[in-house]
Amino acid sequence: MRRTKTSLHNALIGLAREKPYPSIAVKEILDRADVGKSTFYTHFRDKDDLLESGIQEILRSIPDQPLSGKPFERIVVFSLPVLKHIDEHLRAAGPKMKREGRVIMHRHMQHVLTTSIADELARMTQGPNAHMPRDLIARHVASTFVLALNWWVESDPALRPEEVNVYFRDLVAPALAKFFAQFD
């Protein structure tokens, strides 16, 4: 099934480079991936579900941080691997994804990241929220990542992922430090 999912994810990304995301039909994804309709719908509700599954796969492929790692690092461990993954797509030959498709994909990425970060924050911090709610800090980190990602892609794609990662981390570090301080 892993090969089928990879084929479906690749088909979706390939089509998104060629045409507006909203106009991509599931049938086109199936045809390109050479996958049957029943197989697709056994695992996914629609193309958005397929997209979010691909983002979750990228996140799952990132090695876990040790439990003794700094809380900040455990929350932003995703950033550099995701930026490197996106950089590979930016540098790939062929048509570049249009802004509209990127915005939609990044919105889905923000949703998946928010959920993942909120889950990690809940695992890391026990007891009630203090003055800064977990879901707010999760949304802040995820939206700041997407903000930095969009800025990079739209204004300075010559930057290396490592440089963008530093900018992102500098933006979220104060809020994360304040968040974790409330549990000390």
Image: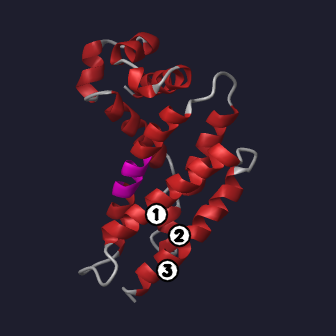
Residue 177's disc number? 3
Query: Circle 1 — which element?
Result: helix
Q: Disc 2 marks which residue? A: 172
Kind of residue at badge 1: Val
Query: Circle 3 — which element?
Result: helix
- Distance between the alpha carbons at the discs numbered 3 and 2: 9 Å
- Does residue 114 show up magenta in the picture? yes
- The magenta stretch spans which residues? 109-115
Kind of residue at badge 3: Ala
Q: Disc 1 marks which residue? A: 141
Q: Residue at x 38, y 64 (%)?
A: 138
Residue 69's disc number? none
**Compared with residue 50, is residue 80 higher up or lower down, i.e. above or below?**
below
CA neighbours of label 2 inside 10 A, class few (<14), some (14 to 19), many (20+): some
Q: Residue at x 27, y 79 (%)?
A: 129
Query: Circle 2 — which element?
Result: helix
Does 152 sit left or right of 127 as displayed? right
CB under 8 Å between discs 1 and 2: yes
Q: Residue 127, position in %: x, y?
A: 24, 81
